[in-house]
Image (cartoon, coloured by chain):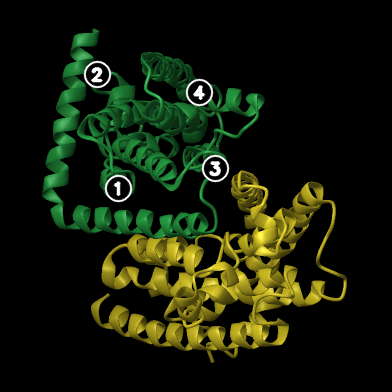
Amino acid sequence: MGLKHECRVLIYQIGLTMRRMNAQRGFIAANALGMVANNLLFFITWLILFQLVDNLRGWHLSDVAMMYGIGATAYGLAGSIFGGWRNLADDIFSGRFDTFLARPASPLTLSITSHLQPSSLGDALSGPVFWLVFCHVTLAQFLLLCVMSFVGSLIVVAFGVVVYSSAFWFRDGRHAGEIIMYWLISFMTTPLHGMPVWAKVIFFTIIPAGFVSYLPVEMIRDPSLDKLVYMVLGAVGSLLVARTVFYAGLRQYKGVSGVRTGI
Amino acid sequence: MTFMSLAPSFFFGGLAVQAARRTTLLLAIRLLLYVTIVGTWVYTLSLMPDGIWARLGLTWSDFVWYIVIAEIGTFAGGPHHREVEYQLKEGHFQSHLTRPVSWLAIWGGYELADAAIGVLALILTGFSFAYMLTGYCPITLTTLPLLALMLTLAAMIWLTIGTAIGLSTLWLGSPLIPYWVAQKMLFVLGGMIIPLHLYPMWLQHIVYFTPFPAVLAIPAQLTMPAHGIGMVNGLLYQLAVLAICLIILHLIWRAFVNKLVRGG
């Protein structure tokens, strides 16, 4: 099965997701609105904080709002287009994953596009709200933010696949995965610019939150092609790592499945 | 019977042992998350300009201790709403309705034991973390039991709210939206990061009409005795909030059982 075939499957699966969204319009809209309200409500803490101080070592409210928006949109796109990664550990544990193995396409493509997270659409929509209300971005900046959020979403998906693939090896992979994903979310919504170098190294390698939200904000503050290239390289690297870890886990899956079924 | 049986059920050794077994892994996860969240906020506050602390009449260390204690209220219990939703969707309630002890009593006892273990572990972890960062501890041996009591009350209030939200699954199909909204209101109106006396005056007037400060700010105010509403007032406020929350939960529970019995 070549790359062309996988791309076709991917597009078909995304189309299927869109149709699923359409079939549950009311439910998804309610969840999406709930998530937008959730994100905006939490941002009130930052509004109160910025009433006390003008800036956090050079970052103003608009920068933090931009970071929040990018983080939310990247996470939202990752959950609405490729939402299956969040169910990967459950699928492995319950045996539902077996159904992906019997189909004529990559199990990675099938598994990441198998589920839709209804609330993710709300996350995806939160970003533009933050950018327009708090950041007063230009049209060019808005489009650039959309592109960078999409690239960021690929990094989130890749990271999610890596952490939830731990279920191939560990029984508690789901819990561990949730913790590690929460770390990613925490660091995606924390201003990283004052961090020491060793911490920044971690946020651009082990937990790639820096690529998802910090670098895009710096890109808008001080545009340069280098930063965009770094981001794209970060996404490509993350996807390659995810693919490698997933297939390494898949090779283990037969053994795990055998133990579970008592074979 | 429901509320009366809550207290003795808390002491049921079997329940406590079960809770301890179940919580070993979940507790470890909670502690990791707790340290991560507290750590990121403490770091964020370290980015504030130096002159701000004198203007606020506080120190960075005061903020560290405030956040460490405020966060315990939310982390002491697990995701109650999800557990209730799971039990409802798996049909556990139907089998409980035929038993002589109310589900609410068993649930309350079980989760309270869980929360008590959580509070203890979080105090140990949080205090170690904050002491490592600040080099002092504002909680004396005489105020420690009061803090433990306030944190347990905070956990009970959040458990009551979480259970009510979980029961709403029967009407809404999913507890997620009300949970998100309640959780974020808790963070903002409860004073999770910023002590309530630093909020705009109009907001300070509103927050105490909600249950949220009883979960976060009231126990955390013990680190800043010069600010806040005082120990006795704080304790009375928590008890009043808990009583109101329990009454509301009881009403929701009755409606829940009625709907379940009639509609299945």
Mark before the other along the chain sequence, 2 or 3: 2
Q: Nearer the viewer, residue B175 or A204?
A: A204
Whole-number angstrom distance, CA of label 4 to CA of label 1: 42 Å
Q: Are marks 4 and 2 on the same chain?
A: yes
- Give the amino acid at mark 3: Ile
State whether residue A214 is above or below residue B158: above
Is residue A98 visible to the viewer in this orientation of the structure? Answer: no
* Disc 4 target residue: A255
Amino acid type shown at disc 1:
Ser
The image shows residue B90 at horizontal and vertical percentages of 38, 61
Q: Residue at horizontal 15%, vertical 57%?
A: A26
Q: Gap in Å between the C-alphas at discs 4 and 2?
A: 22 Å
Identified at 44% across, 67% down, the residue is B185
The residue pinned by badge 2 equals: A105
**Residue A210 against residue B215 in the figure, above or below:** above
Crowdedness of circle 2 by 10 Å Cα count: few (<14), some, many (20+)? some
Q: Position of residue B172 (x, y in %)?
A: 27, 68
Residue at x 49%, y 34% (from the top left corner): A260
Q: Nearer the viewer, mark 4 or mark 3?
A: 3
Please state the chain letter of the residue tagged with numbered disc 3 in the rendered image.
A
Q: Residue at x 40, y 64 (%)?
A: B179
- Residue B8: image quadrant is bottom right
Q: Which chain is green?
A: A
Identify the subunit bearing mark 1: A
Q: Which sits earlier in the primary sequence, circle 4 or circle 2?
A: 2
Have a look at marks 1 and 3 and say if they share a chain.
Answer: yes
Q: What is the number of the mark on residue A179?
A: 3
Any idea which chain is the yellow one in this picture?
B
